[in-house]
Structure formats: structure tokens, C-alpha cells
Image (tube, grey):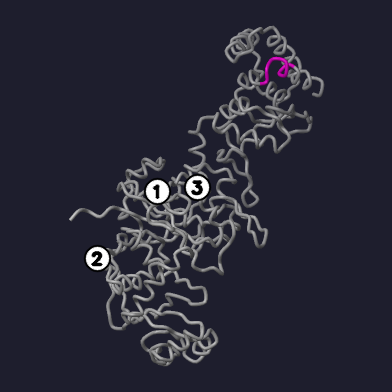
Amino acid sequence: MSERKVRVRFAPSPTGPLHIGGVRTALYNYLFARQKGGELVFRIEDTDSNRFVPGAEAYIIEAFGWLGIKFDEGVSFGGNYGPYRQSERRDIYKKYVKQLLDSGAAYVAFDTPEELDAKRKEVENFQYDAHTRLGMRNQLTLGEEETQRLIAEGTPYVVRFKIEPGEEVHVKDLIRGDVKIMSDVLDDKVLYKSADELPTYHLANIVDDHLMEISHVIRGEEWLPSAPLHVLLYRAFGWADTMPEFAHLPLLLKPDGKGKLSKRDGDRLGFPVFPLEWHDPKTGDVSSGYRESGYLPEAVINFLALLGWNPGGDQELLSMDDLVRLFDLTKCSKSGAKFDYVKGQWFNREYLLARPEAELAPEFVRVFAAHGIDASEEQAAAVIAMMKTKNIEVEEGGVKKKRSISFVRDFYPLCDFFFKAPAYDKEDKFIKKNWKDTSSADMQELAAVLEGLADFSVESQKAAVEAWVGETGKKPWNAWRVCLVGEGKGPDMYELAAFLGKEETLRRMKAALEAL
């Protein structure tokens, strides 16, 4: 018998923006499929029509396009197993609902929401199961004739899966091993609702995975409690031999404290939890995204891949090709992974440093334009080359700290002087410290040296200025920085002067002499 072809799926619900935990799940499915020479299916699970949010589906597709996670088939990609949107598969599901009813594996129930609420108040920890179903209003207690009469009259109903107690259900999980659970703790889950003629997640998920020949189901740990029910459904349909293998990924946890990562954590600590910026169509609220916050997609991918999985070894910077080559589901952690957003910034810095300046330049131009500065991409690339290894000053908890540049937007406070001449404040701490009694005379001499240069390149400046320094013993560097920058920041002075050009360099030196 030939080995089964690997087919995995990512199946989000269009109920809002894609959470970063969902991105990681999709990434692991992608890495697994690529490594095994398999296929990745994109399915939309929209059976809960009440929670549908306009624009969510397009947002999810755009997010994966930005991240570089490519699907082989599915919604918007085509394929031979469609339709891939569950709301378009109603007639398919009805066939399998009938199969379960005909075999006695499921039954019709007419209990109203009010009746169920009353029962929950009456019975502590009420669960619709083998111990309570015979006290409810369903096919098992009403009989076949009354059941068919109520259906014919249009009485709303649901179809529930009939779970028998006393069975030890085994879920074989690639990460957690053999997970065992007694069927007694499972309730008779609703599989279908007549009100909208749509199945619930549990039935649609099983039918779609079977018909689309999904070989492995890789999903979040939050779905682990549903796995025994899904195993029983596969058996009820007679599909046990083609049941996919399961792998339940560890949760992403709060950076501090306990519990699952939420949007509130991101708002509280200042980091995104969505891949792209999200504009809520109902409330108008805007939530930050990794793309708009200045993260590079390859940095986000690398960061997420190592949250809950480790290939072994000390190497942390891994390209998508590296991740595909090294990925191993069995090396995923069973416990949750702390969402270290500071480490995410570190990854972005490393990829920022490695990215060619010309590729960063367009974003740099947009940042400067937002501050009223008109810079060309060529100028932007030159500035980035000079400044990307510098530190910026940030305030954390009332304390000023130095940190490395992690985002293109970090360049602006370090680089405004490239395009705007400084204002020379005699009371400025840096100027008071570095503009000495001899500085005016020194700068006049240096200006004369620079003015005599026909070639204003770094090499030409360096040769002339260092010859002058050797002859005179002067040390002009801090005073020259006062003239050109006005602060204690910036690149090598020769590089800065070459960027500004001879005319602007001399103009700033003259302005400093007049002001100071």
C-alpha cells in the first residue's frame, strides 16, 4: 500500500482579524506540507452566520500574501475539492446528517433555548448526554411519528450526536502521544441546526477533512477537547481507516502573568497581535498590525516559528527554506510558549540589518514625508547605510535607555539633521560642553581647508583634514559635529559632510560661527 499523500489545511472563520496564534498555526501547516512534498488547503469555516464580519476573509488572504505563506488550493486559489467555503456546501452536509440519523448515530432534538436554560438552572452542571437525554424533548422520547410531524410543521430543531458512555476514546497526537478520555465526559454535541440549514463546526470539519482527503490536522491546543468527539464521528461514518493524524500545538501565552495571549495584552504592553492593521467595520476601532508597525514579514515568520518549536542547536536566524528543512512536529513543546515580544523586535532588527538599504529606502522616504521632509530613495538608502547600526534613546518606566534600531521608523529621530540644518542653542548641554573658546578659530581654519577641495569625497576630505590636523595638532571633531548636527549623534563626520555636499557643509559651519 502506497504512503498517503500529505494534505493539510488551515481553516479560519471570517469573524474578525486573524490572531497571531492563528498565523503560527498556518505557518506550521505550511512548513509541514512543504517539507513532506504535500499540499496546503485554505478553507473558510463560515457556518456561524451570526458572527460573520465583512472584510475578514479578504483581510486573512492579504495577511498570508504579505507573510509569504502560500496555499496550493482553496478559497481564491481554486482546486479540485471545492467549494472551499462551508456556507456553499449545505447540500453536501445534509447528506451526511441523514446518514447519521439513518444509522441511529444521531437524533433530532426540539428543545428550545428557554427549555435548555431552565434545565441548566434545575440541574447543576447540566450536560445533554446519555444521563439526561431521555428527560428532554427529542426524537428518542417523542417517537418517530411525532418527530416527523414537528419537522413537517417547520418546528425548529437541531441534530445531536448520540454518544454512548463507558468507552475509553484514544486520540493519537503527534505532539502529545496517546491522549485518552472517557466518553462519559462528552455531551451530545449539536451537529446541525435547521434554522439556517448549516452544520456546526464539528460536523462540517469532519466531512470536509474526509472529502478533501486531509491527512494531518495541525491546530491549536484549544481544539484538543474536541478531538475525542471527532474520533467518534469518524467511526460513526465508517471512515476510521482514513482518519487524519492529529497534532495540537501549544498555546501562545501572555508575556507576563498567566493565561492565553490576548489583544488586551498587546494594547497594554504596546505590541500588535494581528498581522495587519484591522479596521473594525462595526465599531470603527483600529487595531495595530505587524506590517504597519514596521515589522518585516521574514522576521515575523522566524519569530513565530520558534514559539513552541525548536529545531535544536543555537542558530536563531532561519529563513523560510531553513524552517522547511528543519521542521519537525515531534519537537513541538507540549506546554505553552511565552510571547516574548521584545525578542520579536530583536528578530526585526537582525533582518533589518541584513536587508539591502535600497529595499528599505521607500519606507524611509514615507517616514520622512510624514514629517514634512522630501527625501529621494537614493538619499534614504545612503542615510540608512550610515545609521542602521546606531542606537536610539527610549523611555521605559520613566527611565531613559539606549536600544538598537529595530524599525525603519526609528531612523527619523536619529536622521533629521541630514535634511534639516540644526538650530544652535547656546544653552544646549552638548553644545556648551563641546564649543570651546578656540572652536570658532578652529572651524574657520577647517572651513578654509574644505573650501579648497575640488573633490568632496570621504577620501579627499580625510586626506586634507588629517594633514591639517597633523600640522596644527588641533582636534576639531566635536566642534565640527556641533556645526553640522547640533547634537551628539550622527555618523562619521567625513561621511556626513560628503552626503551634505560641500556647499551645505560650509553653509552650516558659517551659520554655527555666526550663532555661537
Distance of mark 2 from mark 3, alpha carbons?
Answer: 42 Å
Circle 2 packing at 10 Å, graded few (<14), some (14-19), many (20+), is: few
The residue at which mark 1 appears reads as 72
Looking at the image, is mark 1 or mark 3 earlier in the sequence?
1
Along the line of sight, the residue nearer the viewer: 117 or 386: 117
Q: Secondary structure at mark 2?
A: helix
Tell me if residue 314 is in the magenta stretch. Answer: no
Observer-side mark, 1 or 3, equals 1
Q: Secondary structure at mark 3?
A: helix
Tell me if residue 503 is in the magenta stretch. Answer: yes
Instruction: Give the residue at x 43% y 50%.
Output: 78
Instruction: Give the residue at x 32% y 79%.
Output: 183
Q: Which mark is residue 344?
A: 3
Looking at the image, is mark 2 or mark 3 earlier in the sequence?
2
Looking at the image, is mark 2 or mark 1 earlier in the sequence?
1
| Image location of residue 458, percent across then percent down | 59, 15
| Image location of residue 297, percent across then percent down | 50, 43
